Image: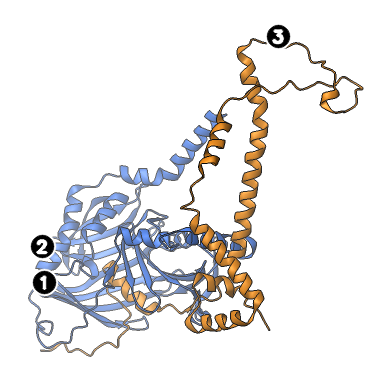
Chain colours: A orange, B blue
Amino acid sequence: MSHLGERLTALVDGELGHDERDRALAHLAACDLCRAEADELRALKRRLRAMGDAAPGERLLARLQAMGEPGDPLPPAARRLPGESRGPSAERPATRPRDTRPAGRTRRAAARRRLPRGRYLVAGAATLAVLGIGSAAFAAGSDPRSLPRVAPSVEQFAVEHALTSGDVPLTDPKPAEKTSDSP
Amino acid sequence: MAGGIAAALLMLWFVTTGDTASGARLQSDPEALRLLRGAEGAARTTPYEGTQFITAWSRSGMATTSLVKVTHVPGDGTHMRVQSTTADQGGQMFEADDSDRTGGLTGYTSKMLDLLARNYAVVRAGQGEVSGRATSVIEARRADGSAAGRFHIDRQTGLMLRRELLDQQGREVNLTFFTEIRPTAPKTQYVLTSAPRTVEAPWAHQLAGADLGSLRYRGWPVRDTLPDRLSLYDARQLDGQGPVVHLSYSDGLSVVSVFLQRGTLDAGSVADWHKATRGGRTVYLSDTMQQRAMWASRGYVFTVLADAPPPVVDSVVAALPHGETGFWGRLHRGLDRLTSWANPFD
């Protein structure tokens, strides 16, 4: 039995013609695999629609706000001496020289040290979002085979073009009626 | 660094908007505009009958010529009938005086005249003669001073007797003029009495701004402007089995129609057309009286009909969406589709 393949997307989009839709639905009734795939696509569509209405919860908002508040400065990073092997930071000797910089810079410096972590989070989230949207777009972008085949009525268009541009139509969709120059 | 980028962007803005800006700076002669505006009024109030000669040159240099019998009775309308033509068919039409359009040489509605004045310097260019009648010559000039259009206005009646559309090299692309005209009550009264009238009118469903916005929201590629300062001046829809959207663009001289249909292109409809590449993409062209192009892209079929110089048509075709295949094409289609799914109004 051949499966619906790319016609599934068109079915979920409601783009199939009457007969083709009936055939696809009949296939779905008999094919567990296609039915499951159709359910997934419909769920994806529902989630995307719901995205506009979704509001963050109060707890999430509180946590996000807390993240924005200034925190305590991070402990100073230990500097390894030449020849010193890597080891747990707790075991490293406190060899960092005393910070003699003005006190006003400490908070800014700490904030700068915190930045990379946030930056990685943002970059990771953005990468995930791009990958997710890209995969969804690729899955949903199957060739629209169910679209109708169109044979443009060029002669009719030529008359419409002439009428809107103020020209005399030199093609006639209707047979030219015979006229007489005499009364 | 930021200053450099800003300067580069500013430079880019000047380069890309330079044409429009220079177009806006072009100074028109008010008297020339008054004569053109008066030609439409004269066409409604003056009785006349005559024969128009219409010729258009295709991309390959082939000319299509038609002779059209024109009769006008004030208060009633204008009857036009193609007497002979080298085109495939010859039609006829009747246009009532109370319609908001006028056909043939007098097709200068106020909207088209506004576009002409915005994009060209409209100036008087001396005196001329058409069919033995003295005329005032008016030219629509590009920013470089070359003539893009030339009009002859009858000094006695104010009727437009000749209209030329010229390309950058000064060659005629489209020419319409009266080979004979009698500005008197028509001897043949068939327009008023027993003659059959083939009344043609554009598609009735006119699309307003909100309709166009809705179409864009649903993914229809509706543009407000096209290259070469072409602006959307009219939009209509033919309802029925699979709607057809007709978008009319003009710069005041050239007229380009873009017809959009949802679907894929039936290969049989381009069997007599030749395949060509425009902007790296495949389109089908037809070398007829009008410049014609057809292609399918992203679920839409595009048909372009134009009374315009070939380079203008080429840039229009290149500016409209074209089919993308492979990975990126599929990704693009998918993004369009996801956007429409996420749209609560769709």
Residue appearing at x 37%, y 69% in the figure: B245
Percent coordinates x, y for residue B329 in the rendering:
59, 62
What residue is shown with label 1?
B183
Measured along the vertical axis of the image, is residue B213 above or below residue A108? below
CA gap, disc 1 and disc 2 = 10 Å
What residue is shown with label 3?
A100
* Viewer can see residue B61: no
Relative to residue A120, is residue A143 drawn left or right?
A: left
What residue is shown with label 2?
B156
The amino acid marked with disc number 1 is Pro
Q: Report the number of discs.
A: 3
The amino acid marked with disc number 3 is Thr
Q: Do the residues labelled 1 and 2 touch (CB within 8 Å)?
A: yes
The reply to whether label 2 and label 3 mark residues of one chain is no
- Quadrant where the image shows the N terminus of chain B: top right
The amino acid marked with disc number 2 is Gln
